[in-house]
Amino acid sequence: MQLFSTARASRRTARSVVLAATVMLSMAGPARADLSDRQMALVSANCLQCHARERTGAPLIAQPSDWKKRVAAGEEAMLRHVIEGLRGMPPSGYCGACDETDLRAMIRWMSEGGADK
Ligand code: HEC
């Protein structure tokens, strides 16, 4: 990867590519948590800017250890935090078009690791 000036940048880029590939794969194949095409588009437009990017403080998709405690607290708690916001998590994740059904599906999809399971 000579295109990138530092090994650090290239590692970061490689990681983003992996995350992007994970998302692409889940768009192509049958999604485990069954996101509709519309929901996948909403996730891409609203959630991935934080949840597929390191150092935003957001639990990362495809990083199960980021989700363990949150999943243990239960979907209702996660839903409340998503709707109301929680520290760096903005209310509804900036998704004005997401209703509760969408958010529940997204929470399941994210916390189950996107496509790779
Ligand atoms: C601006 C960045 C940002 C955006 C956009 C964003 N999130 Fe988050 N999200 C966060 C951060 C940061 C946390 C961790 C909050 C904490 O625990 O301090 C988080 C936490 C969460 C959690 C875990 C909540 C819990 O109870 O622990 C879920 C689920 C979640 N986000 C879903 C979403 C969904 C779905 C979207 C899109 C509709 C979204 N997020 C958009 C930054 C973001």
Image (cartoon, rainbow, N blue to C red):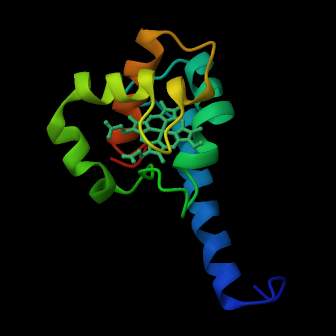
Name the residue furthest front. 87
Which is more toward the observer, 60 or 89? 89
Percent of width and height locating residue 90: 54, 33
| Left or right side of 54 for 82 | left
* Residue at 24% across, 21% down: 76
Residue, x 62% and y 27% (percent of image)? 94
The residue furthest right is 3
Residue in the image at 54% along x and 64% along y: 55
Dividing the picture into quadrants, the one containing residue 64 is bottom left
- Judge by depth and name the residue closer to the eye, 29 or 62: 62
Image: 107 above or below 56: above
Query: Would residue 32 be visible to someone looking at this image?
Result: no
Report the quarter where the N terminus lies. bottom right
Residue 77 vs 99, above or below: the answer is below
**Residue 75, x across and y down, in percent:** 24, 26
- The residue sitting at the left extreme is 72
| Horizontal arrangement in the rendering, residue 113 relative to residue 36 (left or right) | left
The image shows residue 95 at horizontal and vertical percentages of: 61, 22
Q: Quarter-wise, where is residue 2 in the image?
A: bottom right
